[in-house]
Image (cartoon, coloured by chain):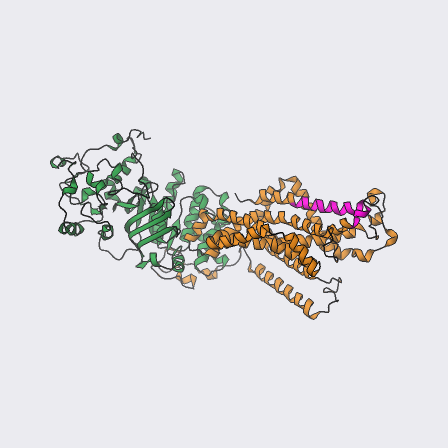
Chain colours: A green, B orange
Amino acid sequence: MQSTHGDSMSRRHTTTDQAEPLLRITDLRTQFDTDDGVVRAVDGVSFEVNAGETVCLVGESGSGKTVTAESITRLVECPPGEITGRIEFRGENLTTASAARLREIRGAEIAHVFQNPQDALNPVISVGKQVAETVRIHEDVSERAARKRAIDLLDRAEVPDPATTADAYPHELSGGMKQRVLVAAALAGDPDLLVADEPTTALDVTIQAQILDLLADLQREMGMAVLFITHDLGVVARVADRVVVLYAGKVMESAPVDSLFADPGHPYTRALLACLPGRGRESGSIPGDLPSPTDPPTGCRFAPRCPFAVEACTTDSHPSLYPVAQEPDTDRDGAGTTAGDSPDVSTPLSAAPLDGAASRDLETTGDGVNTAHVAACIFHGPDRDAAHLDREVSWTVAEPDGGGR
Amino acid sequence: MAGDEPAPDVGTARTAGTGFERIDWTAVDDADSTVPPAAVAAEALVFFSLVAAFVYDYVILANEAPTVGVVGWDVTGVEWLLVVVLAIGVFHAALPLARNRRLTAYYWRQFQKNRAAVVSLGFLGFVFLVGLVGPLIWTAPNEAIDYAAAYQPPVFAGGSWAYALGTDAQGRPLWHLIVYGMRVSLEVGLISMVFAISIGTVVGTAAAYFGGYVDEVLMRYVDLQQTFPVFILLLLLIYLYGASLLLIIALYGLFSWEGTARLVRSEALQRGEEAYVRAAEAAGAGRWWTIRRHLIPNVSSTVITAATLSIPVFILGEASLSFLGFGDPDVFSWGRTISAGRSDLPNAPWISTIPGLFLFLTVLAFNFVGDALRDAIDPR
């Protein structure tokens, strides 16, 4: 919107006023100095993870999901990386924490499960020792006490015959078993937050379901929060409490999982949902490519690929997150019955009056209404009447080669 | 869980408010441990007693008195080093292999695929054993001088069984010279190798892991050392201080690790990018932990191969120095025996050729074994 400021992301409306969240990320920016320029992999991302809940970071490849997750405990190599913003874990700002403090937190309080179990296990160390490693890093225990604990953890991760498997080497285990070992290793420090970076992507579908169930069971059992990174909306529907949709390093939408699927607030989310292979319908793909990370478009980063984009989307600074209010006159899933009275979408929105009062008004829009579901789209700003989302645009039509399964 | 720091008492801290069962970790039985602390204690004890014996030998014992009176063995400085190297080998190669039978059996199956290497390993085992205990069984060549028995041909050339491999110009049995030469080769090869490989591995891993200036400085020094003619330095030092086996071994060990360092660095650079190194960091591992637990074990196949292939280089180097007459005059190196037999080549060719054959076979065997090891233990 023309009325938003570049940094207004940081003033996004928080969710319900419960206790301090376990993890609060505010205006996180992670950039890399490369020969081709500064790559802003994560550009002003804010979200929260409450204790015990599962938050999914969703986005396509290159959207900054992994960099966001790795910025939390500064696993991003710095330099060339540079992390700014606030990452508060139980009120402690991790962006300014010392390296020693971060090492204490890693594994013991924030644990990671990585994408490819094949690569994440050291081929020359028995898996039992690798599970025991986290224990031994954080606690001064003897090797055999750590081994006992590793066997117990492997058992907990439903590895059959854990005592024998503990002596096995990674090449002797199947992919699913390796991922179970990695889950066991991540649990070894008894973390409060588990960052699972596409933990099922490298596995086949039947094993995926098993791992997801295992993670859910363990999460319930241990009461930890999970930050789940995936590009698979099927997985999201299965595990998430809340969803944060990332695109080109920015949050597009943040919503409880039900309202995200029922009422996607951002065209990009709709596009993602349209790409989901479904039963009895064709799945599409989003035309175009991710914007250049060194030279992102002004305005909404999705605007160049967005069929709903109006001129204001591309000329303006990126819109802030606005509550996706359930207003009575809006029925976006309907046939666009209320859209008829909207002005012509080609009307230049930049001509609309802009003053301080209007922008203040914007920032307080969320007060008192359900702000758990927010989207960074012009349609949720003050000019939403001018740029109605109710136009009928079919994603499958927009993409010529949208042949699904 | 709920924000409490891990308390020193693992058993109680773990259970508070978690879904974990109440297990007192401090009370778990020690029945099936993987690394018995007994081995660590034994190693400490062995090295402590070695140091004590060394001090006793050099400070308290009279210069001429044999260290081990029973067998009359006066241990020299080089032999002390050899004992240390052998102890390192026992604790860090033989014991882990014996403990992890399954892995050892797997390596052996892989190794066996190379028949030449199995034969070579047998030959090297023979050289190793004879070189180790032979000097205690057979008298030193200088005590076996018998001019009456000079130029005896070996048994296959019509000689007698009393001198199975023949004798040299002074009537010394060639077998004795070979056995003492084995000991020299053993010392030169193993001690220099341990020196060179240790330094090379540490420098290579450090350069790869720390990168930046550390890498730059270390690798530029490696370049410097690579272009530096160690052989000339050796000749200069021998000219200045006199030839001694210890000097030769030390110089080879201290100035020929650059190849290993480069190899290990490039290997460690690749391994450092692996996901498991990042996973270890994500689990809170510090730099040294990552190096020790993840980088070094993964470059170990490269290191072991490099180590095996560096031994024959050192043995050959010492033999050539001795052949040229710059070797330690107190030890019976194969090179020295070969050199001494040159003038008798027309009438007594066995004096040069038999030690030469042993040298050749030893070097060849190490190369075969090194190649087979590389194939057998590569984790990828």
Q: Nearer the viewer, residue A116 or A65?
A: A65
Look at the image and give the residue range highlighted in magenta.
B340-366
Q: Nearer the viewer, residue B240 or A47?
A: B240
Q: Residue at x 64, y 50 (%)?
A: B311
Picture coordinates of residue A324 (x, y %)? Answer: 20, 45
- Would you identify the image quadrant in which residue A253 lies? top left
Question: Which residue occupies the extreme bottom position in the image?
Answer: B60
Callout count:
0
Can residue B214 be seen? yes
- Would you identify the image quadrant in which residue B36 lies? bottom right
Q: Residue at x 73, y 69 (%)?
A: B62
Question: Which residue occupies the extreme left position in the image?
Answer: A341
Residue A207 is covered by the magenta coloring = no
Picture coordinates of residue B108 (x, y %)? Answer: 61, 44
Can residue A49 be seen? no
Q: Residue at x 34, y 47 (%)?
A: A38
Which secondary structure class fits the magenta region best? helix
Residue B353 is covered by the magenta coloring = yes
Picture coordinates of residue B292 (x, y %)? Answer: 51, 55
Question: Which residue occupies the extreme right position in the image?
Answer: B148
Picture coordinates of residue B296 (x, y %)? Answer: 52, 52
Q: Quadrant of the N terminus of chain B?
A: bottom left
